[in-house]
Image (cartoon, grey):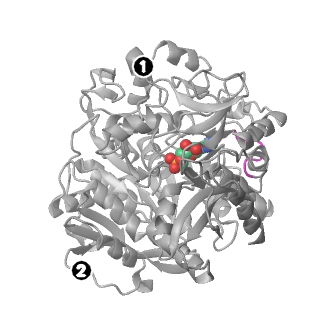
């Protein structure tokens, strides 16, 4: 991990420490340092504190059932309903007229909507009744392929209400990616929409969804289509099994649907993510553990209070949006802002305009966005009143000290603590960060594990490394928000997450998130990035194997190797090294075909930023592609060790082609 050690070095040499601002501490949800010892001494019972944030129908018998490790179960025997916890209980508490979702559409001339808890509950019930009417039963997976429109959280909560797990597929995913996920989940229902707005133009979404449906291997019983674009739509006719969302909801208006009594361990949703193989894995999250985790971390880390207006810029199609736009903030009864568009439309101050207009108290975004804000310049935030902000957060990739400080100064006015939150789709919610009312922050370092979360940095043998040495991040006890398995693939669950560092004979189970990290003498972690074959492009996890599969689909391509290369704003960019079949030249047409195939196989967000044609790929004697060397080439770094290669000469050739092209 040579280049990674460099990152550790950078964070050390620039070690500023910032104490939590007093004004923040005095009002923080958590401000007692004692919570760390308390949780350690009282583990796992400490997690009753998370469960206590929810209303349970039937109380649980046991906090943690670890009788079948690593298939942990949390809050067993308890029953509850996620939609009840996010909606009904707030209405019952007299807060029905508070805004639950403040929706902001991309077009600026359109009426934005503040949807109250009462209104949201009514629409969720109407759509839950609709789903039941269509035949959706408890346990049926309902897929959503939808952008940032209010009907997405409505559909998620309607599923939760009737005990049907949802599987949300990010709208930017291609038709093929949608089909793969529906096939994997045996999902017979799809909720989608006609289109949405991107940078001022309507974008056809239904065409893509339809083409995905054509590749689903089983029978799809029903498709519900939201009419987002109205007059700007593309004039699609709905097929026989396709229904207009608004008419269905109108038919069921006013119908009461009692929240289904769900077991704590019942699946709340599936979320597909990339791993080492080309096959995306369905991460299974449960009702009791996940919702407790999303709620507890929203409260303790993001400091959300019921009266807050909170703005997270993620897309609900990824886990950040699930946990920290929908479930966490709504379970706590706050107002969650949901923005349809991009940060630079119509101008580069759009997000700051939203913060000022709705007087947002928290702002949670990704380092890739912060790097763009920094590049655009401080005049954009400076032209708006951001004084309502109390806390800033970042998630998705490592943040360097420079953008951290820019964020602190220009967005937070040096008055807001920043939480750099490390977590993953698999962890369900935040795992590593500074509790903002307790811990000082160190730009470039995420912080210690949360109370009750035992994170360490180990070497390849599982021994803890010395302070400030690079190693592998590991988690040494389970937590309520953890994934329960890879859907329909318990073996892969063990193989991917537990096999590396656990010692089943000694009954020692260690979770391996597949990230590299360093840890300082105070237990603060600096996360270095993925150590499996996945890339982190603008905070999106993309498997190299998935991109390679899409590239070798192209006629004339023989072999492909894909790596993530450092990129100024995206964090990483996709670089592809491609060999062609005999008689096929590396032409521009072939290049276009490769890009198109990646867009069709995964989505435009995975599009290669660089394609290099080469006569051969660097391979070990056993024929394994040495991606590490290609990474060096892509980053313009000095080459690592080539002595184990069967064809060492090829690396320099690729290097010269890469610099020429
Ligand atoms: C991977 C998880 C967590 C929601 C968004 C991404 C990287 C995440 C940080 C951070 C450094 C981070 C890790 C992790 N990552 N947060 N604060 N500092 N790296 O979810 O797609 O499941 O990706 O994102 O590499 O493993 P995801």
Q: How far apart are the two marked residues, 1 and 2, measured between alpha carbons?
A: 52 Å
Task: Read off the magenta span.
Answer: 411-417
Q: Is residue 163 magenta?
A: no
Residue 223 position in % (x across, y down): 26, 69
Residue positioned 33% across, 84% down in the render: 236
Which residue position holds label 1? 44
Residue 47's spot in the image, x, y percent?
Answer: 43, 24
Residue picked out by circle 2: 239
**In which quadrant of the rendered view does residue 564 lie?**
bottom right
Q: Are marks 1 and 2 in contact (CB under 8 Å)?
A: no
Q: Quadrant of the C terminus?
A: bottom right
Q: Secondary structure at mark 2?
A: loop
Local crowd at mark 1 within 10 Å, few (<14), some, or many (≥20)?
some
For label 2, the crowd category at 10 Å Cα-Cα, with few meaning under 14, some 14 to 19 and many 20 or more, is few
Q: Horizontally, is 402 left or right of 611 in the view?
A: right
Depicted 503 relative to depicted 149: above or below: above
In the depicted view, which residue is nearer to us: 38 or 190?
190
Figure quadrant of the N terminus? top right
* Viewer-side residue, 215 vs 150: 215
Quadrant for ligand 1? top right
Give the dominant element type of the magenta stretch: helix, strand or loop. Answer: loop
| 609 shown above or below 415 | below
415 drawn magenta? yes
Confirm whether residue 116 shows in the render: yes
Mark drawn on residue 240: none
Residue 406 appears at what percent x and percent y? 78, 50
Looking at the rendering, which quadrant does residue 428 occupy? top left
- In this orientation, which residue lies closer to the viewer: 343 or 448? 448
* Residue at horizontal 72 percent and vertical 21 percent from the top: 521
User: In this view of the protein, can residue 383 be seen by the observer?
Assistant: no
């Amino acid at each position: 991990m040579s280049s990674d050690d460099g990152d550790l070095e950078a964070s050390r040499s620039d070690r500023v420490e910032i104490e939590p601002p007093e004004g923040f501490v005095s009002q923080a949800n958590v401000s007692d340092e004692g919570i760390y010892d308390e949780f350690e001494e009282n583990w796992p019972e400490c997690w009753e504190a998370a469960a206590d944030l929810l209303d349970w129908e039937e109380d649980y018998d046991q906090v943690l059932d670890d009788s079948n490790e690593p298939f942990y179960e949390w809050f067993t025997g308890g029953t509850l309903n996620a939609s009840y916890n996010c909606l009904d209980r707030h209405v019952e508490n007299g807060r029905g007229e508070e805004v639950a979702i403040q929706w902001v559409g991309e077009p600026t001339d359109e009426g934005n909507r503040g949807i109250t808890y009462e209104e949201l509950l009514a629409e969720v019930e109407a759509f839950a009744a609709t789903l039941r009417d269509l035949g959706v039963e408890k346990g049926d997976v309902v897929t959503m392929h939808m952008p940032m429109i209010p009907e997405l959280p409505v559909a998620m909560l309607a599923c939760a209400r009737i005990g049907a797990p949802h599987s949300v597929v990010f709208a930017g995913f291609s038709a093929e990616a949608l089909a793969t996920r529906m096939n994997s989940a045996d999902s017979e229902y799809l909720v989608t929409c006609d289109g949405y707005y991107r940078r001022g133009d309507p974008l056809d979404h239904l065409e893509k969804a339809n083409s995905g449906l054509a590749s689903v291997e089983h029978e799809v019983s029903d498709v519900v289509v939201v009419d987002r674009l109205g007059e700007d739509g593309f004039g699609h006719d709905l097929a026989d099994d396709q229904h207009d969302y608004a008419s269905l909801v109108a038919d069921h208006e006013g119908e009461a649907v009692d929240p289904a009594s769900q077991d704590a361990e019942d699946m709340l949703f599936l979320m597909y993510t990339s791993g080492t193989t080309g096959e995306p894995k369905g991460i299974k999250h449960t009702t009791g553990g996940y919702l407790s985790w999303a709620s507890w971390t929203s409260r303790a880390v993001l400091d959300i209070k019921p009266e807050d207006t909170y703005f997270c810029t993620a897309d609900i199609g990824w886990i950040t949006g699930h946990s920290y736009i929908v479930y966490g903030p709504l379970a706590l009864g706050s107002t969650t802002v949901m923005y349809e568009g991009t940060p630079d439309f119509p101008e580069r101050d759009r997000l700051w305009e939203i913060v000022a207009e709705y007087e947002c108290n928290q702002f949670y975004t990704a380092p890739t966005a912060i790097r763009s804000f920094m590049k655009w310049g401080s005049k954009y935030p400076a032209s708006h009143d951001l004084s309502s902000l109390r806390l800033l957060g970042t998630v998705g990739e490592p943040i360097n000290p420079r953008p951290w400080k820019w964020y602190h100064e220009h967005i937070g006015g040096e008055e807001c603590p920043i939480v750099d939150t490390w977590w993953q789709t698999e962890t369900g919610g935040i795992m590593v960060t500074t509790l903002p009312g307790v811990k000082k922050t160190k730009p470039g370092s995420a912080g210690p594990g949360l109370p009750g979360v035992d994170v360490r940095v180990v070497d390849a043998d599982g021994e803890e490394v010395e302070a400030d040495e690079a190693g592998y991040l590991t988690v040494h006890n389970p937590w309520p928000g953890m994934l329960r398995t890879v859907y329909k693939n318990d073996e892969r669950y063990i193989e991917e997450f537990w096999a590396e560092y656990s010692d089943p004979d000694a009954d020692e189970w260690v979770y391996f998130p597949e990230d590299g990290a360093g840890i300082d003498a105070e237990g603060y972690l600096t996360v270095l990035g993925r150590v499996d074959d996945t890339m982190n492009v603008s905070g999106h996890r993309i498997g190299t194997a998935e991109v390679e599969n899409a590239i070798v689909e192209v006629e004339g391509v023989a072999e492909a190797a894909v790596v993530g290369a450092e990129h100024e704003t995206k964090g990483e960019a996709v670089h592809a090294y491609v060999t062609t079949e005999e008689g096929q030249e590396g032409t521009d047409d072939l290049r276009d075909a490769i890009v198109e195939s990646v867009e069709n196989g995964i989505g435009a967000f995975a599009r290669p930023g660089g394609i290099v044609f080469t006569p051969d790929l660097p391979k070990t004697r056993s024929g394994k592609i040495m991606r590490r060397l290609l990474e060096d080439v892509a980053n313009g770094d000095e080459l690592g060790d080539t002595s184990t290669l069967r064809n060492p000469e090829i690396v320099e050739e690729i290097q010269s082609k890469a610099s020429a092209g």
